[in-house]
Amino acid sequence: MRIDDQLHIDTPEGARLTLSLAGPLPRALAYGIDLAIRGLALALVAIPLMLFGRGGMGLYLVMLFLMEWFYPVLFEALWQGRTPGKRMMGLAVVHGNGAPLGFNGSLVRNLLRTADLFPMFYLTGFVVMLITRRSQRLGDLAADTLVIHTPPARPARPHQDGDSEAPDWPLSRDDQLVLLAFTDRGARLSAERQEELAALAYPELAPAAAREKLQRVARHVLGGA
Amino acid sequence: MRQSQFEQRYRPQWERLETSLTALEARRRPQASALTDFTADYQSLCHQLALARERGYSLALQEYLNDLMLRAHRQLYRYRTPLLPGLVAFFTGGFPRAVRYQWRWHLVSTLCFVLSAGLVWAMILHDPELVHTVVGPQQVAELEEMYHPELRDVSGRDRQDDVMMFGYYIYNNIGIAFRTFAGGLLLGVGALVAMLFNGSFFGAAAGHLTLAGAAQPFFTFVIAHGAPELTAIFLAGGAGLRMGWAVLAPGSWRRVDALRRAAGECLPVMYGVFALLVLAAFIEAFWSSRELAPQIKYGVGAACWALLALYLLFAGRQRRRQGGRHGPE
């Protein structure tokens, strides 16, 4: 069993979506950023509206209402499930099946925010997030939505120089992933640790030779069959 | 098939898919021909990704196909319904139907409000001092200032005040309705408390102002916008109770599924609540504050209540098809 925050969804097309769920902390930070943006926007609106006296006060109250209830709804529905705060934290809201968020889903999860707020500081929502499997607050449960980390753009792998060598065993997908991780993280590991790992693959070779051989095999995998 | 052959054969198809994806993501409408190919390209892409995995083609290729598939999945499953026809269908039928579908809950919430209001009202008529158990001294003073014929001052009221009060009603009343609905999720307690509290407050205000001889200004003020406003609060309370009940007694559903179902049923009601409260804010700010003969205000108010009741009870009913539900005669 794997213990991590990855959620795998098998679509009807037989493809597999891998989503990584966002926990309470990045979500709280995103909320804080949004709160600051809302406060700033309201302050900016308030200054010109003050010139209009009590009528301006009325318009300000309408703005306050829209900011409180519809700021998250509109951003999430029209901007691929992201408020500015979520975007900065690299988060997005999607439906439970991985589909993009629509207006209805966003409205449900944001209307029910008050229940998550109860009694203060999102205590209910926090507890519910900890005990649900996909770290959803009450609003997420009702709307069937998830908050996920948006996958970073895949970095281009630098081309590996050097000669390559075909592996002497049939490579499974998991083997390939392990080899890939070995090359990606190799630079951050000490030579001794690399040799130790390589010895797991080639116990019969001397550690330094095993490392050389494993690197050649990894280059082969990266280069393509 | 070797990987290079595989790539060579399908690369043009992937590139075509990428072009239409770029257009779709920028919310531009791609050419009709590109859209016809989209689903077919997507399907064969899924097939090719599975093949690439099975045959152990390079991870770079697998990752490229996987990312392409994810982008296409996002576009294919995006919900985007046309706004205007949906709105028309909603107001001509969807909203009243959604309300009638849950009529028991709206009845319960209405009764909570009306009974607590009636009880407090009667108690205050019996013992005027009881008003202070429900309403704070400052609020009593504000109520008297607003409605008492000798204390209130209407001469200074102008358009500016109308706009200000409009904003206040939007901010305050819609916020209350939304919070009442969400409070229902806490096992119904939040919605119940909100209905009982608002009912008691209304009863206290009515009872106290009746005794203070300000009944006429009070009722002429509230009767017209009361129709959409109180109805909306009743509906928000009912929807909240429905949510709480789904958690308390999900029946044969899993709790989370019962909750989702309830949310789906309540959503149209809440859209309607929002619309009713915006309407109420308009009436309250721009009509209720006008100084007109009481007969006119009572007449308009009664018409508001009657129209709203007729709308919620009868709009959007479908004529039962002959022999549909009863079977052949």
Image (spheres, helix red, strand yellow):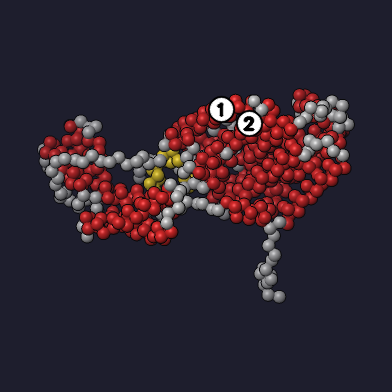
**Image quadrant for the N terminus of chain A?**
top left
Residue B304 position, x and y percent, is 78, 47
Write down the quadrant of residue A63 in the picture: top right
| Residue sticking out furthest to the bottom | B329
Please report, as a chain letter, where disc 1 is located.
A
Residue at horizontal 81 percent and vertical 44 percent from the top: B301
Residue at horizontal 73 percent and vertical 30 percent from the top: B161
**Frontmost residue, B143 versus B160:** B160
**Frontmost residue, B267 versus A127:** B267
Please report, as a chain letter, where disc 2 is located.
A
- Eyeballing the image, is B84 above or below A122? below
Q: Which residue is mark 2?
A: A60
Q: Which mark is residue A206?
A: none
The amino acid pointed to by label 1 is Leu
Q: Secondary structure at mark 2?
A: helix
Q: Which residue is mark 1?
A: A44
Write down the quadrant of residue B14 in the picture: bottom left
Residue A17 position, x and y percent, is 38, 49
Is B39 on the left or on the right of A221, as rendered? right
